[in-house]
């Protein structure tokens, strides 16, 4: 019996929500999901549709969400629907909603930039080389088991978070003379969260299609979606 996946995409175009989600549609279908794609989060307010959904994959950076849609999303996850996403499509969505932030457990705060003299005025100003390091839990969890620490050169998310998250991987922001913090700051890079009968999965890597195509990032996201989905 097939399961149902709902892909909701939109918001800030800089994260290429259409192109990014298109990368994963064949995987979802090959994994036995009937896939529905929506460009508006108002689908969350459709209680009948949400009751039939086993997995939500969200790629909506910033934007807004209505009270009805947010209530529908929270109700669906609490009832057992999985919620999965990457980068700003889940960790920088609906900045004005504290209830959404509570649901996902982490909010983008910043992505530290290069030394000022090296900046050229485009998105690459925030591309840094950094390492995603697996936690002890991450080395045994089904989403990340068998993987090793790996390096990326892209946006490195600084995330505000809470301890309801099960953190599978972290990344550390070193102090720099051109930044105002004075000691290393470690942020979760991959985490899961239980919410009622539902599961939430977040990977902070995924700024662009080439990052999503990285073998480690893609593996983590594909496994994360399967883990989150109602079984």
Image: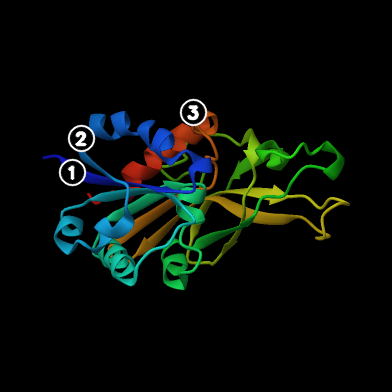
Q: Residues within 10 Å of mark 3 (few under 14, many from 20)?
A: some
184 horizontally vs 62: left or right: right
Q: Are marks 3 and 2 in contact (CB under 8 Å)?
A: no
Tell me residue 210's x, y (percent).
Answer: 53, 28
Tell me the element at label 2. loop
Q: Which residue is mark 1?
A: 3
- Residue 220, image quadrant: top left
Q: Which residue is mark 3?
A: 213
Q: Is residue 180 left or right of residue 150?
A: right
Q: CA distance from mark 3 to mark 2?
A: 21 Å
Q: Counting residues from the N terminus, which is met first, the one under dot 3 or under dot 2?
A: 2
In the picture of the structure, the residue carrying the numbered disc 2 is 32
Give the x, y percent position of residue 30.
25, 29
- Label 1 environment density (alpha carbons within 10 Å; few <14, some 14–19, many ≥20): some
SS label for mark 3: loop
Residue 160 sits in which quadrant?
bottom right
- Name the N-terminal-most of marks 1 and 2: 1
Residue sitting at 54 percent across and 60 percent down?
107
């Amino acid at each position: 019996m097939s399961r149902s996946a709902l892909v909701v995409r939109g918001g800030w175009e800089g994260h290429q929500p259409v192109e990014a989600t298109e990368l994963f549609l064949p995987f979802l279908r090959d994994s036995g999901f009937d896939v529905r794609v929506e460009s508006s989060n108002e689908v969350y307010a459709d209680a009948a549709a949400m009751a039939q959904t086993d997995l939500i994959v969200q790629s909506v950076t910033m934007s807004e969400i209505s009270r009805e849609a947010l209530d529908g999303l929270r109700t669906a996850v609490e009832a057992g629907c999985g919620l999965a996403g990457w980068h700003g499509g889940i960790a920088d969505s609906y900045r004005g909603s504290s209830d959404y932030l509570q649901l996902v457990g982490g909010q983008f705060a910043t992505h530290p930039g290069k030394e000022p003299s090296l900046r050229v005025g485009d998105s690459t100003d925030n591309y840094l080389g950094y390492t995603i390091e697996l936690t002890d839990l991450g080395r045994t969890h089904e989403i990340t088991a068998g993987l090793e620490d790996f390096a990326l050169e892209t946006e490195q998310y600084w995330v505000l978070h809470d301890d309801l998250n099960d953190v599978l991987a972290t990344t550390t922001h070193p102090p720099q003379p051109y930044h105002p913090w004075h000691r290393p700051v470690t942020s979760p890079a991959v985490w899961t969260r239980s919410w009622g009968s539902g599961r939430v999965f977040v990977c902070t890597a995924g700024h662009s299609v080439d990052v999503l195509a990285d073998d480690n990032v893609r593996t983590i996201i594909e496994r994360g979606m399967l883990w989150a989905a109602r079984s």
